[in-house]
């Protein structure tokens, strides 16, 4: 089995999605197969419902067997599937070759005649196993960081989503990099995966149907504008003022609100594409009148779109989602400031709720003492942040991977 070195220095077996077309052509040549087999292999990987080389019947048995010994058909050893919302949402827990677990979520929406849009199917993919940013309202942040995903491991989340949709006679319409991990802290693999997904011979997805969401990695936003200008930028903002954003998005200590907004404005100017801002709505933390006024003032005139998303409950925080009527009030305040606003439902609530929650459950629960300590620290830090004090240090996860109790 062919292997590749990971950025972390370990080795792992190569899957078909890790290979660019010229690398696959070289492999086919080395195997003594005819060049037309390259197209058959790519079609088998990207346009069939096969789950192994032996399922790609166009290849014939000898080539199926050679491929089985040379490259993995899929990056995943195990695929667990949970349905929610009467089948509108499918949550996938995927086990990688080294045992790391990541999640992808497939969301289906009906046609919307008012907006003139057809049925949509969006897959939300992970770019890292775990995440180093450590946002305290996020189940993935609580897991800590395991490793970056390869371009193939990212693309294979999309392949699986397309296979599921194919059995339902549906098409994948959108891809969002909004699952586990901070995509712009794994930017080379993310860009390589975008190249694979948009390659007509492989994913064949329009670049404008792809969104990359970041918690505010400013150099990455600048690279995205220069190197992949057709991709939509989403910013996980969550708070408009630095003391609170330091707490909610610890990366804010490195790239504060003003730097992130300035980079996003630069991206919008350079690409002509509208930025989306995401705000997870947390009761009594970022939904107070002064918070919504600061948000409206920060984004006024930007032409941005704002998604307001009720927080999913996670065990290690004392926080809960904002009241629906408060979220509607804030949406109206932002609309009055000239912004377009969508109030999102939390997709997948029944299926393990927040992104990272299934993986966190499998990793094992942190000790009750660690959870209690973390909750106390968060209460103290949020009191300080709401009084306008900036906290110097992020609060470490309570576990299971980052715990110390
Ligand atoms: S919200 Fe995003 S950036 Fe923050 S910890 Fe979770 S996955 Fe990482």
Image (tube, rainbow, N blue to C red):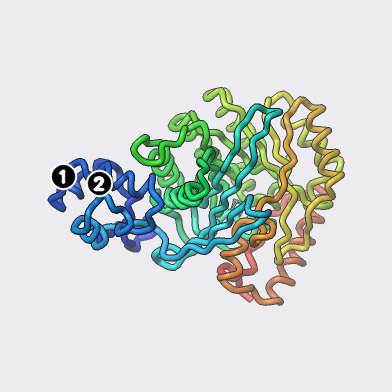
Mark 2 lies on a secondary structure that is: helix
The residue sitting at 70% across, 47% down in the picture is 245
- Mark 2 Cα within 10 Å, few/some/many (few <14, many 20+)? many
240 vs 65, nearest the viewer? 65
Residue 180 position within the rendered picture, expressed as x and y whole percent measured from the top left = 55, 54
In the image, is 84 to the left or to the right of 188? right
Quarter of the image containing the C terminus? bottom right
Camera sees residue 238 = yes
Helix, strand, or loop for circle 1? Answer: loop
Closer mark to the observer between disc 2 and disc 1: 1
Residue that appears at 63% across and 53% down: 87
**What residue is shown at x 68% (from left), y 28% (from top)?**
115
Mark 1, residue position:
34
Name the residue carrying label 2. 24
Q: Can residue 241 be seen from the camera position used here?
A: no
**Residue 347 picture location, percent across and down:** 67, 51
């Amino acid at each position: 089995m062919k292997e590749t070195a990971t950025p972390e220095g370990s080795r792992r077996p190569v899957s078909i999605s890790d290979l660019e077309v010229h690398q696959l052509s070289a492999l086919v040549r080395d195997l003594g197969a005819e060049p037309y087999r390259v197209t058959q292999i790519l079609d088998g990987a990207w346009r069939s419902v096969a789950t192994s080389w032996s399922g790609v019947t166009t290849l014939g048995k000898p080539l199926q067997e050679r491929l089985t010994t040379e490259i993995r058909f899929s990056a995943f050893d195990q695929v667990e599937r949970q349905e929610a919302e009467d089948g509108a949402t499918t949550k996938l827990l995927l086990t990688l070759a080294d045992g790391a677990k990541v999640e992808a979520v497939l969301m289906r929406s009906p046609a919307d005649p008012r907006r003139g849009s057809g049925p949509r199917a969006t897959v939300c993919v992970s770019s890292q196993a775990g995440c180093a940013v450590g946002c305290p309202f996020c189940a993935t942040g609580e897991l800590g960081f395991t490793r970056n995903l390869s371009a193939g491991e990212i693309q294979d989340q999309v392949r699986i989503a397309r296979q599921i949709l194919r059995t339902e006679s549906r098409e994948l319409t959108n891809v969002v990099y909004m699952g586990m991990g901070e995509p712009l802290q794994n930017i080379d693999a993310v860009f390589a995966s975008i190249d694979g997904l948009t390659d007509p011979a492989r994913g064949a997805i329009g670049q404008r149907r792809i969104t990359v969401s970041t918690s505010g990695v400013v150099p990455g936003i600048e690279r995205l504008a220069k190197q992949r200008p057709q991709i939509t930028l989403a910013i996980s903002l969550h708070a408009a003022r630095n003391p609170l954003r330091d707490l909610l998005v610890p990366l804010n200590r490195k790239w504060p609100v003003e730097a992130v907004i300035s980079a996003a404005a630069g991206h919008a100017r350079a690409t002509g594409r509208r930025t989306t801002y995401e705000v997870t709505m947390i009761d009594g933390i970022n939904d107070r009148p002064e918070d919504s006024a600061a948000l409206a003032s920060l984004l006024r005139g930007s032409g941005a779109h704002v998604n307001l998303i009720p927080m999913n409950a996670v065990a290690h925080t004392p926080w809960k989602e904002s009241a629906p009527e408060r979220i509607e009030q804030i949406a109206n305040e932002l609309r009055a400031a000239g912004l377009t606003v969508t109030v999102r439902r939390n997709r997948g609530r029944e299926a393990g709720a927040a992104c990272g929650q299934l993986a966190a459950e499998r990793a094992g629960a942190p000790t009750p003492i660690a959870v209690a300590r973390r909750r106390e620290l968060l209460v103290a830090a949020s009191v300080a942040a709401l009084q306008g004090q900036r906290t110097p240090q992020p609060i470490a996860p309570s576990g299971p991977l980052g715990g110390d109790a």
